[in-house]
Image (spheres, rainbow, N blue to C red):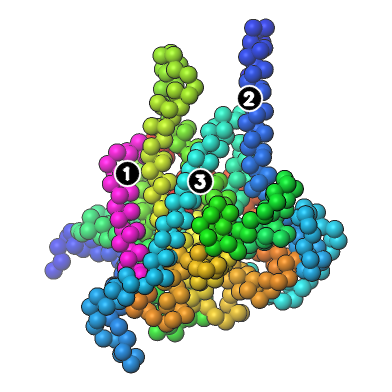
């Protein structure tokens, strides 16, 4: 006979059953298989245990090294531009008396547009001869027009700069909204107290606003880094899985895709996935730590919003 | 601001107004930069000449307005079919996602059973595995189950997700237990309590999740690219990406197709913008 407690529990297990079955089939099983595949190699269509073979291949692979470097460079460049820009816009919006909903709507528009569509349009916007940007530069009297997406070098007018402008343009509205929520969560009495103490606007900003935004910064930097690690759609649309020109736009996930679906090397591709897993895991753990450790004000902020 | 009627306040008031105008002007310049690519896209999509030679300097109004590019785009691209595919896949997976998220959220918010903490930790752990990490074996699984080139491949893996369940649970814990206990005393079974008592109170998180999930599913291209190769099953995003590879040289036609892919969603967004922006700000997360 089942005890009363177990019988009472049964109905809840029944509710959980479909969800955990879906998890087991589409989440746990593939994740385990990713690890499994990364330790094997295919010999005459048979999977053979190969230890760390795929990982040694991966470390020696220069295309992979480049993809990692690209992913990091593009992620850092994106955050370095988007954070200050969206903070300035959020501060302006926070001081605006009328029409802030209108601006929110406009700035947020790229967020709801499909990444593929946006990337397609930007492919034309950055066209060197007749694109929108070079057209504007020409009107401003610039002589040496940049090649943008056709220039694979590390440069402020090269392919990496172009896709960073694209990413910032897409994400600006979202970052701005999150900063705005952060700004509105800072209690106004702190500012009043600062004015009483004789602080100017710049001092208030430095001593109250910036520290008050610390949790917002941490949240955006960490989620932004995780997003950057899995960047695929826009760069794939512009440069194919190889990240043309000259692999300057190939990220880790694009390398993973190319290894699996063009070279049909599922084992090596799985090794890439495992590396990606540990990078994202590390970032997530930092995220949890920071948030559970010192940000219990978050719940209040949500309630206020 | 109308309350300030003292003469001494006028110069202060003027400074305030000037400041508002400056803020407005800066934000407007930014807004124009946000709109310009869309505007240019639409303008070019109406120009037949754009297919042979793009005007220099770029024009924000077509020299030769015509619907030619749209006629070609619609003829080349079964965009209506793509829309129906996207709509079906997005709708079914979003309804399923909301159902499983809210049901599991309810279990963890209001259930009393053995092993609850362990099962909850498992749920949280699923949040740590990004889709990209498991997508290759997931594709192999779909192939083995013979589900590639079916709608199922686009729906099944996205029916349940840790994020939605966590969000629903967080919200449901704020619903008073008394309400649930009262229904239990009245003899309602647990599913009826979830469906009739708790779910109707969960408007805000359900709306937020619906918006987020619909955007994720609608805009995803990586997964459809892997499991769909038959063009009848293309989603809008995949169809657009594939078409771009073929008609890339015909700028006017390509931008007409892109406009067709963007415009309906953009119009929907303008209608529902407050709701959508609130939903995304509510969850504080996008993906």
Residue B34 visible (yes or no) = yes
Disc 3 is placed on an element classified as helix
Mark 3 highlights which residue?
A81
Q: Which residues are magenta?
A: A270-299
Whether discs 1 and 2 lie on one chain: the answer is no
- Does label 1 or label 3 sit earlier along the sequence? 3
Subunit bearing disc 1? A
Label 2 SS: helix
- Residue in the picture at 66% in, 22% down: B17
Query: In the rendered structure, does residue A287 fall within the stretch colored magenta?
Result: yes
Q: Quadrant of residue A115?
A: bottom right
Measuring from the top left, give residue A234's x and y in whole percent.
54, 62
Indicate left or right for B36 with B136 as reference. right
Task: Tell me if label 3 and label 2 are in contact, CB under 8 Å.
Answer: no
Residue corresponding to mark 1: A291
What residue is disc 2 on? B19
Left or right: residue A165 versus residue B197 is: right
Q: Is residue B208 above or below residue B148?
A: above
Please state the chain letter of the residue tagged with numbered disc 2 in the rendered image. B
Q: Position of residue B198 (x, y in %)?
A: 40, 51
Tell me whether the residue at label 1 lies in contact with that at label 3, contact meaning CB atoms closer than 8 angstroms: no
Q: Could you tell me how far apart the alpha carbons at marks 1 and 2 are, in whole angstroms? A: 37 Å
């Amino acid at each position: 006979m089942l005890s009363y407690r177990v019988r009472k529990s049964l109905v809840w297990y029944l509710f959980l059953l479909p969800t955990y079955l879906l998890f087991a089939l589409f989440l746990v099983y593939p994740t385990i298989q990713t690890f499994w595949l990364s330790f094997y190699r295919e010999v005459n269509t048979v999977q053979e245990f190969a230890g760390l073979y795929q990982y040694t291949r991966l470390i020696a692979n220069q295309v992979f090294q480049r993809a990692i470097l690209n992913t990091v460079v593009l992620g850092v460049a994106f955050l370095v531009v988007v954070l200050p820009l969206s903070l300035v816009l959020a501060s302006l919006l926070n001081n605006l008396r009328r029409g802030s909903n209108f601006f929110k709507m406009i700035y947020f528009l790229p967020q709801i547009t499909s990444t593929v569509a946006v990337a397609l349009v930007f492919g034309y916007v950055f066209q060197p001869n007749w694109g929108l940007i070079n057209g504007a530069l020409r009107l401003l009297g610039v002589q040496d027009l940049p090649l943008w997406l056709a220039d694979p070098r590390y440069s402020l007018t090269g392919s990496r700069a172009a896709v960073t402008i694209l990413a910032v343009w897409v994400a600006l509205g979202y970052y701005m909204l999150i900063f705005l929520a952060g700004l509105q969560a800072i209690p106004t009495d702190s500012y009043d107290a600062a004015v009483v103490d004789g602080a100017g606007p710049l001092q208030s900003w430095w001593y109250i606003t910036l520290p008050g935004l610390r949790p917002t910064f941490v949240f955006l930097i960490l989620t932004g880094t995780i997003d950057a690690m899995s960047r695929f759609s826009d760069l794939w649309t512009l440069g194919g899985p190889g990240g043309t020109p000259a692999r300057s736009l190939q990220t880790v996930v694009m390398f993973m895709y190319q290894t699996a679906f063009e070279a049909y090397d599922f084992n090596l591709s799985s090794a890439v996935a495992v590396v990606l897993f540990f990078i994202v895991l590390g970032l997530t753990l930092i995220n949890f730590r920071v948030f559970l450790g010192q940000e219990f004000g978050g719940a209040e902020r949500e309630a206020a919003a | 601001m109308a309350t300030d009627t003292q003469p001494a306040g006028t110069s202060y008031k003027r400074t305030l107004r000037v400041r508002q105008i400056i803020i407005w002007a800066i934000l407007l310049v930014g807004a124009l930069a946000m709109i310009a690519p869309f505007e240019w896209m639409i303008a070019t999509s109406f120009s037949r000449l754009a297919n042979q030679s793009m005007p220099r300097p770029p024009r924000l109004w077509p020299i030769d307005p015509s619907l030619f590019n749209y006629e070609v785009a619609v003829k080349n691209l079964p965009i209506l079919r793509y829309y129906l595919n996207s709509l079906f896949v997005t709708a079914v997976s979003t309804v399923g996602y909301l159902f499983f998220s809210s049901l599991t959220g309810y279990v963890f918010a209001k259930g009393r059973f053995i092993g609850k903490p362990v099962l909850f930790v498992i749920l949280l752990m699923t949040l740590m595995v990004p889709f990209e990490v498991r997508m290759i074996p997931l594709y192999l699984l779909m192939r083995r189950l013979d589900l590639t080139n079916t709608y199922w491949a686009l729906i099944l893996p996205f029916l349940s997700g840790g994020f939605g369940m966590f969000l629903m649970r967080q919200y449901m814990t704020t619903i008073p237990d008394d309400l649930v206990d009262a229904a239990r005393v009245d003899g309602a079974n647990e599913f009826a309590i979830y469906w009739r008592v708790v779910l109707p109170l969960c408007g805000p998180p359900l709306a937020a999740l619906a918006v987020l999930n619909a955007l994720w599913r609608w805009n995803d291209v990586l997964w459809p690219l892997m499991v769909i190769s038959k063009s009848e099953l293309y989603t809008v995003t995949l169809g657009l990406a594939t078409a771009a590879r073929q008609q890339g040289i015909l700028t006017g036609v390509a931008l007409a197709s892109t406009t067709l892919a963007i415009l309906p969603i953009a119009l929907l967004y303008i209608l529902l913008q407050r709701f959508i922006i609130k939903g995304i700000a509510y969850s504080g997360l996008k993906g």
